[in-house]
Image: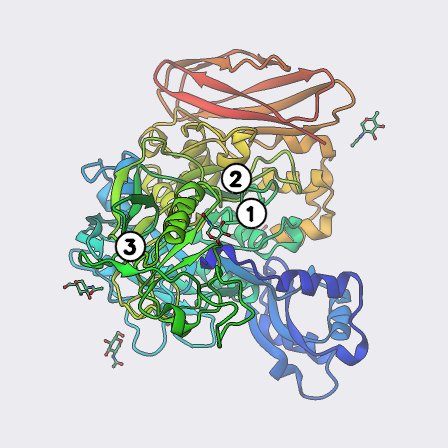
Amino acid sequence: MAWYSSLILCVSFILACTIFSKCDASEDNPKLHIVYMGSLPNTSYSPTSHHLSMLQQVFDENDATNSLIHSYKRSFNGFAAMLTNQQKEKLSQMEGVVSVFPNRKLQLHTTRSWDFLGLVKSVKRSRAKESDVVVGVLDTGIWPESDSFKDKGFGPIPKHWKGACSGGYNFTCNKKIIGARYYTEDKTARDAGGHGTHTASTAAGNYVPSASFYGLAQGTARGGVPLARIAAYKVCDETECSSSAIMSAFDDAIADGVNFISLSLGGSFQNPFDEDTLAIGSFHAMAKGILTVNSAGNSGPSPTSVSSVAPWMFTIAASTIDRKFIDKVVLGNGKTLTGISINSFSLNGTKALIAKKNGGSGSTTCPEQDPNACNCLDSSLVKGKIILCDETGSVDYPSGNPIGSIIHDPTKGSPAFVTPLPSLMLPSIQYQQLKSYTNSTKIPKAEILKSEIIKDISAPKVADFSSRGPNTIVPEIMKPDITGPGVDILASFSPVAPPSSITYDKRSTKYNIISGTSMSCPHITGIAAYLKSFYWDWSPAAIKSALMTSAKPLKGSKNDVGEYAYGSGHVNPISAVHPGLVYDISVDDYIQMLCNLGYDNEKVKVISGKSNACSKATHRSLVRNLNYPALAIAVNSTTSFTIKFKRTVTNVGLAKSIYKVAVTPNPKIKITVVPNTLSFKSLHEKKSFVVTVTGGKLPLQTVTSSLTWSDGIHHVRSPIVVDIL
Ligand SMILES: *[C@@H]1O[C@H](CO)[C@@H](O)[C@H](O)[C@H]1NC(C)=O
Ligand SMILES: *[C@@H]1O[C@H](CO)[C@@H](O)[C@H](O)[C@H]1NC(C)=O
Ligand SMILES: *[C@@H]1O[C@H](CO)[C@@H](O)[C@H](O)[C@H]1NC(C)=O
Ligand SMILES: *[C@@H]1O[C@H](CO)[C@@H](O)[C@H](O)[C@H]1NC(C)=O
Ligand SMILES: *[C@@H]1O[C@H](CO)[C@@H](O)[C@H](O)[C@H]1NC(C)=O
């Protein structure tokens, strides 16, 4: 029923077609492809004419110009074009071409949340620097008239900004939204779906007092960095995003001068970096000092469901906050049952009839229907009544015209959704009680009440839908990296989009409550930007390290490897501002990791612009020495093992300080850290250490631990995860 849970399988169709070459020549219709050519050459060079001349070599007549959809030429080199498989094959062989990807369809994946994180309204801000930060949001566009984006009190546009306001018809920027571009067919950066307005306002929206969803979740809506600027890049329509559009947006955003890229979308598979356009785009961003923050995905809780796996991306899981939406239904017999929903409607004290069946035998419109299903409703049975749905799924409201709905939700831990009419979801026991009541009486009736808010003392907990690790592409890189609020988040919305994302819902609203890693991602973007306002020169890796090493691990669900759900833990912005030590990573370090992974010189050159980058000795086993703020490895369970990780920390705390290490014991493994004390004499001094993890034959089970450097003030924690090959 939620947009985020429907995974569209275009990707697998395209892949099946190329891997098995089942597409015979008669079906070789031109399809959109991305021809990726790596970094821009240093010399004077005209990318577009080069792209056209390449296309002319594979097209018979003058079709080359028509086939070229877009040239990437500002931050990296390449183009998008309509190509047949034959043309694609020829182009792949041409000099300078790194890879040719079929265009993929990717999925889009408050107020209380900031207080919950401790980033209260009165928090110390570095006002001048914060207003220099530009957050680039690649999403469904933005609603420029939203209160979250008014520019009252904003100073001049930051000097480093080189972008443009190209939002299309009737789209004006201001000193808050300083840039807008679109890559979609509707030719406007205006947001018709609401998702982009929600994510942008969560990251960097203004303070807006008295925001609520029909009185629910009332409070001050605000982003993590309310003083920062926003640049909107519309790469998605209401439901889908295309990878060629995302490449264009990366190309522009990097050249425009954004400081962060917030990317609340993704695919559904783990792909090698050289086949992952998000990984490629974000590599170029990282090389220019721009951190890309990416949602982990909403395909959890199954293992390996996280699709964002590159180490230079910041991959964000979603967890609950202490505010929970519940809803009650009062039955004709006086009994009250409690479920969940975000139901803004009231039946005003009147009980409505409950439909005993929705279709099935005796029904003219839905005779084949299971009488307890809701995907086909017979209006003669349900009009003006409350329907009961035995299963979650799409509900056929328009044909049935019911007055309300009660839906059985056997899964625990699903978030509450905005409903298009009085509606709630009941867990199994309560739903059975409702069914026996309707069975036991001739004229069953009920009143569905408006939602209430309760305090959820179990928060924060990782949401079931949040995509999980491990990372199968590079097991040494723990993914996801961190978790933040992503359940039932209030933020600004597009007034032309239905708040329940069901078109039957004709309401127009300035704020909406949505769940997803799409919502946790901009929280972390906002916090990363908050950090940058204090440490303008920090690398993307240093900012990421500060957030990860200060995060707090959560209680995982049973039998789960917690780290695969929440990474380093729940974000803690106040501690992150004073991390003590950071694990920094340079562009060269990432390049060396690619070499160690087995990428050849040519591939690495076109990604990074460096010639003969892999001249140093490379070895697969060195990948684990990437200076990541988490330690992960996959070992062979049939043999004992000794694994050494090398790490280097940079002192960003007190000039003179002594850090001692502590390790969380785990009886299955032995961990030693040498040296176990680090004495710093100055700021930015670096110290290295080696972590040795030894173990016997492990049963088929992941083992976790952690190490923490502490000077008594700062606690710099890294999880250690040993997985089984
Ligand atoms: C490209 O130009 C920059 C500065 O203009 C220079 O430092 C760099 O070495 C050049 N790279 C190549 C591969 O020629
Ligand atoms: C521009 O868009 C806004 C918001 O939809 C609308 O209120 C306004 O009338 C539009 N103006 C024009 C000239 O179309
Ligand atoms: C309940 O009252 C509100 C406010 O008067 C009204 O808007 C709404 O339509 C009423 N609901 C029903 C089901 O009558
Ligand atoms: C309701 O009645 C139907 C038909 O008599 C029966 O199959 C079902 O088990 C009953 N459900 C409950 C919860 O009593
Ligand atoms: C694990 O080690 C054993 C013994 O050396 C070897 O036969 C097996 O192939 C290894 N398994 C993996 C997954 O590497």
**Quarter occupied by residue 595:** top right
Q: What amino acid type should be assigned to the residue bearing mark 3?
A: Ala
Q: Secondary structure at mark 3?
A: strand
The label on residue 446 is 3
State the separation of the CA atoms marked 1 and 2: 8 Å
- Residue indicated by mark 1: 308
**Quarter occupied by residue 119:** top left
Q: Earlier in the sequence, mark 2 or mark 3?
A: 3
Say whether marks 1 and 2 touch (CB < 8 Å).
yes
**Residue at (68%, 16%) from the top-left corner?**
694
Can residue 500 be seen in this snapshot?
yes
Residue 473 in the image: above or below residue 648: below
State the separation of the CA atoms marked 3 and 1: 45 Å
Q: What amino acid type should be assigned to the residue bearing mark 2?
A: Pro
The C terminus sits in image quarter: top right
The label on residue 480 is 2
The extreme bottom residue here reads 61
Q: Answer few, some or many: residues within 10 Å of disc 1's Cα (few below 14, many 20 plus, some between 14 and 19).
A: many
Q: What amino acid type should be assigned to the residue bearing mark 1?
A: Ser
x, y percentage for residue 475?
A: 65, 36
Please state if 83 lies on the left or on the right of 19 as rendered: left
Please state if 321 lies on the left or on the right of 40 as rendered: left
Please name which of the two marks, 3 or 1, marks the residue nearer to the observer.
3
User: Which residue is nearer to you in this view: 604 or 203?
Assistant: 203
**Residue at (35%, 37%) from the top-left corner?**
535
Please state if 155 lies on the left or on the right of 96 as rendered: left
